[in-house]
Amino acid sequence: MFWTTVLAATGPASQAAGSLSGHFTWVDWSVLLGYMVVTTLLGTLLAGKQKNMDDFFLGGKGLPWFAVSGSIIATEISAVTFVGVPAIVFADGGNFTYMQLGLIAGLISRFFVAFILVPAYYQKRIFSPYDYMGNKLGEGARRITTALFSLGGLLAQSSRVYLTAVILELVLAGPLGALQEVTHVDTLVWAVLIIGIVSVAWTVIGGISTVVWTDFMLFLVFITGAVTAIGVIVSNLPGGWSQMVQVADEAGKFQLWDLDMQFSPTKEFTIWTAAIASVFGNIGAYGTDQLMAQRIFCCRGPGGAKLAVLSSWIGQAITATMMLVGAGIYAYYKTYPEALTGEALNRYYEEPDRIFPIFILTQIPQGLAGLIIAGIFAAAISSMTSILAALSQTTLSTVYLPLRAKALGIDPKAELTMSEQSDGEGRRIVRVSRVLILVWGVLLCLAAFAVDAFKNATDVPILSLALGLAGYVHGALLATFLLAWLPLKVNGRGLVWAAPLSVMTVFALRFHDHWAYWACGIVLAILLVTWVVSTIKTHDAELRTLRLIKTVWLVIGLALVMGITRFAYFHEHHPDTGEVVMVYPELEDPATGEPIRDPDAEPVYYIHPLTKQPLVDDGGNQIENEEARPVLRDLEAGAPKKVAIAWPWYAMIGGFVAFVFGYLLGEPQKDEPA
């Protein structure tokens, strides 16, 4: 590595502490692998036999509320949280304001889910929220919500797979590097493959029962890993706990509330997003996203389900602990800046989100490092096993079971009782479920590489990326539940068109470049053509006329989305002058396609992220950041810099669009709701 920083040693860490290679010893491997083996064995034993669909996807509806609550927390506190939260606190200007979202929105949303959604779901035996919505609004609603959930699952969970693979690359740098040399397959591919194999295996073993019980054990590991990290930090600081608090407090790390009453839709962690926007997103996540909602159906009754949902709010204590870890890492490196040097500093500059794994691999003693890394893997695999079980179940209910019911000559509406036709049929469904888990596991791993490409092309923190991707569908899922729950007497046909409108609205909120206009235009044109063709082919003349009239509403929706991608953004203003910040196109070398950097510009040097002192090489010379040299730009083609609406608002705005147009494009129900 080209980093060779010369800094005076003032603490327990030495220059060698900056090296990542070889720090994860056989002791750590023993702890990590031992944990994986024990968890696998216990999860298998506690899962019991999987004779039919009820056993595989509902745990026989006999799981205790405390296990379900722990599973909800383990799924919520994913690797993104375990790694991303310390990173946002550690960063310049970072603090605890992210936690506002969980303290306020997390509590309000849980009460809504416990006292509104849970009673609705327990009216009859179902396997997912989409069964409830399908029973109320028709098969079209079931299909579109399943499609939405599948899209959201791929988008959000693939980011978690990617992040864990990045950590695995750090831990297994030597072995994976050797594999790459032999096979010419990138180390990231091997890391993703390892994660995929373990996650698929755990899910296939015993279905949702294994997932819930392993999640519960993972929950315990989260706590142990986080507390261990804080303990190591405190024990290595001369002033202990008081010094950690003092250093972090002086940097403003403990600021929890952003009470600025000036509304700003471009800020992520404000009192406005916590009290309004995130409430909608959290209700969608906990109550209508099968990833989390699946646990609700595993309880012994609605009372246990309510208790599991409400008690899972204590998971905010883990979020607070991880934020404390970020503050502690800041205090540690502020006290011992020489500890963040060499390869460790290089890795940090490449990806600031990695600061916690870097700290673990360079500063945590043997054995304890294995325990904390086990916590990170626990968080990641917990999320992936959960999404695999959920995706398998929804695909089974929406695609396979109706086809199988038709082949058996059974009423498709009675498909939920198919596994009770015979023991052989129940075992057949379990086998198909396991195949679907494998298929979705492959798709999630492939999607992780798309996240890698997007992350490399942007500077979006991994936490915001994962939560923002989930916001694409949560609003539409909540809107569908409301249309089913409220006495509006409309069917779900309108949602078939309103759901894509909702997703494209969120896309339009995020992207405002010319390519985004074209992307929106193409997708919406396809939507309109499909609507017109299906309307013309309608045999019922009265219904065809009604649908032709409703075309006006669809056109209004399409125009709304195009208007959002063209105009729904804000301009960034310079904090000192207040003037609008301008951006200018880069000039590229026609031969290489690379940007042309100004050779006459003053050099920019690397500085330490904590001390802000310049980094020097072995000869005492400052290390120049050649990529920081200004890129020559076309000063005649400037445009104001556009800032998009913050991701917490995605679910609320997308949900509003889905609800309004789902109702306007829907049709009167012919039969009474189920």
Image: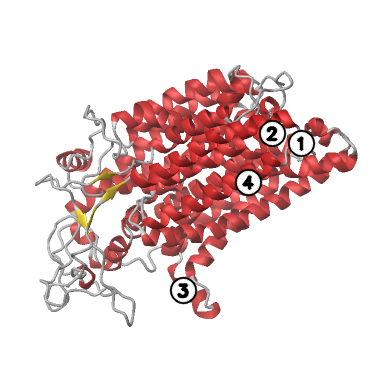
Give me the C-alpha separation between circle 3 and circle 4: 49 Å
Q: 277 above or below 194?
A: above
- Do we see residue 195 in this rendering? no
Q: Residue beneath label 1, please? A: 539
Sequence-wise first label, 3 or 4: 3
Residue 307, image quadrant: top right
Residue at horizontal 49%, vertical 41%?
A: 558
Q: Residue beneath label 3, please? A: 177
Sequence-wise first label, 3 or 2: 3
What type is the residue that disc 2 sits on?
Answer: Arg
Give me the C-alpha separation between circle 1 and circle 4: 16 Å
- 195 to the left or right of 544: left
- Residue 530: which disc? 4
Helix, strand or loop for disc 1? loop
Q: Are the residues at dot 1 and dot 2 in contact (C-beta closer than 8 Å)?
A: yes
Image spot of residue 43 (x, y percent): 64, 43
Q: Residue beneath label 2, please? A: 544
Give me the C-alpha separation between circle 2 and circle 4: 14 Å
